[in-house]
Amino acid sequence: MNEILIVLCTFPDLGKARETGTALVESHLAACVNLIPAVESIYRWEGKVETAAEVLALFKTTSSALPRLESRLLELHPYDVPEIVVLKPDQVAESYARWIVKSVI
């Protein structure tokens, strides 16, 4: 069964998030991307605690497209280790799920 998935990924700025999101929607790897600006991230990197202003992207996709989406995301992303977290929603409205499946190849 083709499950609906939500992929979370942070970007350094709105321009790169928009560019990547547009590319993934245009290539039918995501049906929709929501960009949430002004996210503050606190993380450990190379032994130090860092903070950064980032943009959170929520990609709506399917389980069958996920491997291709992840591969393309790794190609386009500027970070050495991009955040790619996949969530499986417990419930998705049937009409919205159908739209996602029809939009993603």
Image (cartoon, rainbow, N blue to C red):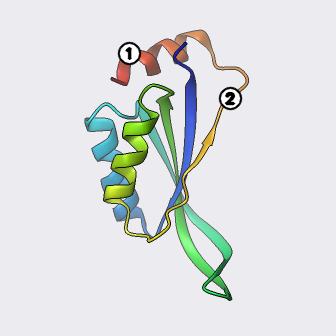
Q: Relative to residue 82, is residue 35 depicted above or below?
A: above
- Label 2: state its secondary structure: loop
Around disc 2, counting alpha carbons within 10 Å, would you say few (fewer than 14), some (14 to 19), or many (20 or more)? few
Q: Is residue 69 left or right of residue 46?
A: left
Residue 76: % across, % down: 32, 58
Query: Residue at position x 48%, y 26% from top?
Result: 62
- Label 1: state its secondary structure: helix
Q: Is residue 76 left or right of residue 39?
A: left
Q: Which residue is mark 2?
A: 89
Residue 51: % across, % down: 64, 81
State the quadrant of the N terminus: top right
Residue 60: % across, % down: 50, 34
**Which quadrant of the view contains residue 16?**
bottom left
Query: Residue at position x 51%, y 27% from top?
Result: 63
Q: Relative to residue 94, is residue 46 depicted above or below?
A: below
Around disc 1, counting alpha carbons within 10 Å, would you say few (fewer than 14), some (14 to 19), or many (20 or more)? few
Query: Residue at position x 56%, y 74% from top?
Result: 53
Residue 78: % across, % down: 37, 68
Q: Which residue is mark 1?
A: 102
**Which quadrant of the view contains residue 75?**
bottom left
Q: Amino acid at mark 2?
A: Pro
Q: Amino acid at mark 1?
A: Lys
State the quadrant of the C terminus: top left
Q: Is residue 30 left or right of residue 49?
A: left
Instruction: Find the distance from the CA under tag 2 to the CA under tag 1.
Output: 18 Å
